Structures are given as structure tokens and as C-alpha cells.
Image (cartoon, rainbow, N blue to C red):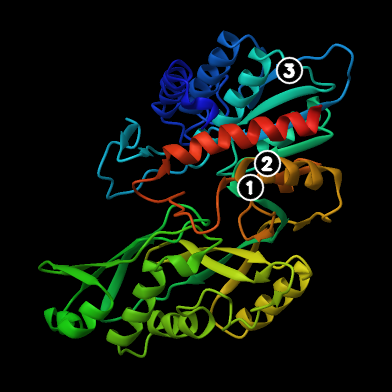
């Protein structure tokens, strides 16, 4: 028996959730009063309108971020639930319109269903049920709607410049029971200046859209002077092994490699189309030229692995597991190739050690290293008040003992003080975040409402 088993409540819940899911909140070009694009602005306005209809006070901080608040005039402190309404790009291969939510066989399909509109809305509705039941809390409660989680940190920076942080907070953007450790995250680029070849010209190479997603397709176009160049791509068995498709023209060839998308925190669940392409091209282009040397260096330094073995950064620890590395984006042409990597490293490792090792290895090649962004790891002790409160909420909801988790995912918990990730998925649940046909099971959403109502109560009572 769930709180949402009341038909009237269930109808309201899904009708309002669908309103949010229908809005395309992929980051787009900045506009006046829309720092992350018009879609995200519309999404924030929509969710805040719903909050007003539920009787909450609302605040919109210049469309960078907003929140709904359940006020207690006797308290200056607040507990928070922090999630995000922005979503990653859709990608190809969906069986349904990703912004036309649909329920099929007990599953809600839409971009943002699990990451993170569905769970965030479950948190909001949980607070609504507490308010409508006239349950008294000793602290204020805010549901905070982030807008830049998938592509930056500007929303949280903007918030913390104007608001004090919550005394206790959770983000419904990872796994149950409780994620007490999150790996550190760093990004970097490798670049290569391309020298011309006498036999062919690299018109372009492209693959991936975000460094935190395993690319599922890579495309290369090469022009040539002599049509015999096409013979390099006639090995049907090799093309099948690497899932390669080619399109031959009079003076050029288009080559596509196909893989499987996954989140950068779990690259082993995907199949990196860019890395496949690099290995394939190195096997078929048997020339003594600059591009072939680049391919050799790439495969020696990166290869097909996802733990940084070739770069000798394959660290691991007991608290959070193995380092993971994902090549998320490649773009290049006959002048330069640029590749962007996303590394998730264990909580006990110093990121400077990783950077030093990568620089040492890269400096021995034809590639160049450029440091990107960095977020330090997160780690909470099990006796922290936040952990004890969420533990009680989880055990009362799921009737299971709590197992504290470590994650390679990067959530708002790294950015907002006093915050850990709490749900929405349980161990073993399929995780379709950042993938085609993203969904969350209806019963999972109902469990989230239950768990988050208890969690908010335990944190704010």
C-alpha cells in the first residue's frame, strides 16, 4: 500500500509530472533572462507554478535556480531536497517521443523520467502530502530546483552566493540506500596537430556530445586522390568485429562505428564508439604518416580500456572502488583533433597524482594535455546525523537494512554542503539515465514518494 494508491492523488501526481516532462530542458543558447536557454527557463517556471498551486512559497533566482518552501516561522534553518530539471541531449534510437511521456507496462518513458525530473517531483509531492496532512516540522523545508547539473555548476554557485546552505539535505539523483561516498571528478583534453598526408586527407572526425556520456557513434570522413585507397576498408570480417559501416564516394569515404551509450561513471556498461574507431583505423591505415602515428599513440595511451590502465592511473580503494575514465567527445579535421575525457577517481586518491601521471605519459607522445574541471570527492561518516536520519527513513520504507554506498556519479552533493544522494534507484535496478528509452517504473516512483516523505520528516521534525 503506497501513499499514492489514492486514485485522486495518483492522477494529480502524474498529470503534474507530465507537464514538466513535456518541456525540453536540454541546455541551449543563453538568452535574456534565460541563462541556460529558453527551455530550461520554461521548465523552471512550470515547476514553480505547480508549487504555488500546492500552496508553497516560491522563489526564482533569475532563472538560474528556484525553490519551493514549506515555512516554519519559528526557525531560521532549513533542510533541503536538491535535484535538477535540466536533462542531457536525447540522442538517437528512441521508440517514443522523449518529450511526450507515456506509461507502458508499468514504466514511465521520457527524457528526465529517472534523471532527475521524476524523483525530484516525487520529493515535491512528498512534501505536499506532509503539508496537506498538517504534519508539524521544526525546520523550514525547501525543494530546490537546479537547472545546470548536466553541464556545469553555475546554478549552485548562484544559489550559494545569495542563500545560506541547508543544515541537512539530500539529492534524489543516484541510488538507495544512501551514497555516503562520491568519487572525485576531473576532465581533461588531449589534442593533436595534424600534418598532411600525401595519400589522403582527414576531412573530419566527430563523436559524442558530452564528456560524461559514453559515445554510441563515431563518424569519420576521409578524402583521397587514388581510389585504391578504398581497399583499406574492404575487410568485411574486421568491419563486422568493430561494427563499422562505410559509404564510398568518388573521392571520399564516410566511416561510422557504432557502440552503446552509458554514463561515464559506469563506462563498462557501454561500448565506446570513438575508441573502437581509433583501434579500427589503426588496423586498416598502414601508412607511415602523421595520422597513423597519432592513432598508434592513442591506442598505446588510451585504447579500449575504461580504468586508465594504459596511462597507469588505474587506482582503486576499499571505500569507493576503481577509477574510471571515459573518452566522451572527439572533434577534429585535417588541422587538429581534440578529445575530452571524464575521470572518476577514488575518494582516497590525490587528483594531483593522476594529473602528474597523465602528463608524464602524454609528454612522451605526439599528443598535448590540457587540464579541464575538477570536483573533489565526497565522504560522510556513518554516524553523521544526516546519515542516521536517512537510514531510518529507508528502513521504514523498504523494510531492509541500510548498506552505505559509494558512487562514481557526480551529483549535487559535491557542490551543496551537508548533502548526500538518496535514491531513486535500488541496487540491481536498470539505470537508463542518459540513454535512449529512459524510464522509471511506476512502483519506483511510488516508493520514492514514500521514502522521501519519511526522509523529510526525519530531517525536519
Label 2 vs label 3: CA separation? 18 Å
Lateral position of residue 407 relative to residue 8, left or right: right
For residue 59, side relative to residue 116 (left or right): right
Q: In the image, is residue 100 above or below residue 12? A: below
Q: Nearer the viewer, residue 167 or 216?
A: 167
Q: Quadrant of residue 362?
A: bottom right
Q: Residue at x 64, y 27 (%)?
A: 65
Q: Mark 3 = which residue?
A: 135
Per the model, the C-alpha gap separating discs 3 and 1 is 23 Å
Please identify, in this view, whether the residue under mark 2 or under mark 3 is nearer the observer. 2
Q: Residues within 10 Å of mark 2 (few under 14, many from 20)?
A: some
**Residue for point 41% across, 73% down:** 275
Q: On the picture, is 175 further left or further right than 76?
A: left
Q: Is residue 371 left or right of residue 73?
A: left
Q: Earlier in the sequence, mark 3 or mark 1?
A: 3
Label drawn at residue 272: none
Q: Quadrant of residue 342?
A: bottom right
Compared to 330, does 15 lie above or below? above
Q: Are marks 1 and 2 in contact (CB under 8 Å)?
A: yes
Confirm whether residue 334 shows in the render: no
Q: Earlier in the sequence, mark 2 or mark 3?
A: 3
Residue on which disc 2 sits? 396
- Quadrant of the drawing holding the C terminus: top right
Q: Which residue is mark 1?
A: 399
Write the residue at 50% across / 42% down: 115
Residue 188: in sight, yes or no? Answer: yes
**Residue positioned most to the left:** 250
Amino acid at each position: 500500500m503506497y501513499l499514492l494508491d489514492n486514485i485522486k492523488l495518483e492522477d494529480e501526481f502524474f498529470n503534474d509530472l507530465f507537464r514538466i516532462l513535456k518541456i525540453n530542458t536540454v541546455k541551449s543558447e543563453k538568452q535574456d533572462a534565460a541563462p541556460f536557454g529558453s527551455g530550461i527557463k520554461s521548465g523552471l517556471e512550470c515547476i514553480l507554478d505547480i508549487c504555488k498551486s500546492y500552496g508553497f512559497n516560491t522563489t526564482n533566482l533569475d532563472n538560474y535556480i528556484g525553490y519551493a518552501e514549506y515555512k516554519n516561522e519559528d526557525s531560521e534553518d532549513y533542510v533541503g531536497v536538491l535535484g535538477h530539471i535540466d536533462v542531457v541531449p536525447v540522442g538517437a534510437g528512441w521508440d517514443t517521443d522523449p518529450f511526450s511521456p507515456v506509461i507502458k507496462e508499468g514504466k514511465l518513458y521520457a527524457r528526465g523520467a529517472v534523471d532527475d525530473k521524476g524523483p525530484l517531483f516525487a520529493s515535491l509531492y512528498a512534501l505536499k502530502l506532509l503539508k496537506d496532512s498538517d504534519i508539524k516540522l521544526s525546520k523550514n523545508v525547501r525543494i530546490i530546483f537546479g537547472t545546470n547539473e548536466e553541464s556545469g555548476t553555475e546554478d549552485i554557485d548562484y544559489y550559494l552566493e545569495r542563500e545560506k546552505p541547508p543544515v541537512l539535505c539530500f539529492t534524489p539523483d543516484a541510488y538507495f540506500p544512501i551514497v555516503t561516498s562520491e568519487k572525485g571528478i576531473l576532465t581533461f583534453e588531449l589534442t593533436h596537430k595534424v600534418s598532411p598526408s600525401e595519400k589522403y586527407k582527414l576531412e573530419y572526425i566527430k563523436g559524442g556530445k558530452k564528456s560524461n556520456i559514453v559515445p554510441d557513434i563515431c563518424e569519420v570522413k576521409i578524402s583521397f586522390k587514388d581510389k585504391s585507397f578504398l581497399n583499406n576498408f574492404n575487410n568485411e570480417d574486421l568491419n563486422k568485429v568493430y561494427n563499422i559501416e562505410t559509404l564510398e564516394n568518388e573521392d571520399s569515404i564516410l566511416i561510422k562505428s557504432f557502440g552503446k551509450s552509458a554514463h561515464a561513471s559506469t563506462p563498462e556498461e557501454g561500448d565506446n564508439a570513438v575508441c573502437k574507431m581509433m583501434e579500427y583505423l589503426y588496423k586498416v591505415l598502414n601508412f607511415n604518416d602523421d595520422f597513423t602515428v597519432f592513432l598508434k599513440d592513442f591506442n598505446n595511451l588510451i585504447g579500449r580500456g575504461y580504468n586508465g590502465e594504459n596511462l597507469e592511473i588505474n587506482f582503486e580503494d576499499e571505500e569507493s572502488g576503481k577509477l574510471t575514465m571515459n573518452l566522451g567527445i572527439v572533434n577534429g579535421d585535417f588541422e587538429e583533433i581534440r578529445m575530452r575525457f571524464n575521470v572518476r577517481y577514488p575518494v582516497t586518491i590525490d587528483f594531483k597524482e593522476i594529473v602528474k601521471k597523465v602528463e608524464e605519459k602524454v609528454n612522451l607522445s605526439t599528443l598535448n594535455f590540457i587540464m579541464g574541471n575538477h570536483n573533489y570527492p565526497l565522504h560522510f561518516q556513518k554516524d553523521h546525523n544526516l546519515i542516521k536520519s536517512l537510514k531510518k527513513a529507508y528502513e521504514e520504507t523498504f523494510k531492509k537494512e541500510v548498506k552505505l554506498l559509494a558512487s562514481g556519479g557526480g551529483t549535487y552533493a559535491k557542490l551543496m554542503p551537508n548533502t548526500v544522494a538518496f535514491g531513486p534507484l535500488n541496487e540491481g535496478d536498470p539505470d537508463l539515465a542518459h540513454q535512449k528509452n529512459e524510464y522509471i517504473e511506476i512502483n519506483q516512483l511510488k516508493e520514492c514518494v514514500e521514502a522521501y516523505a519519511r526522509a523529510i520528516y526525519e530531517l525536519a521534525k
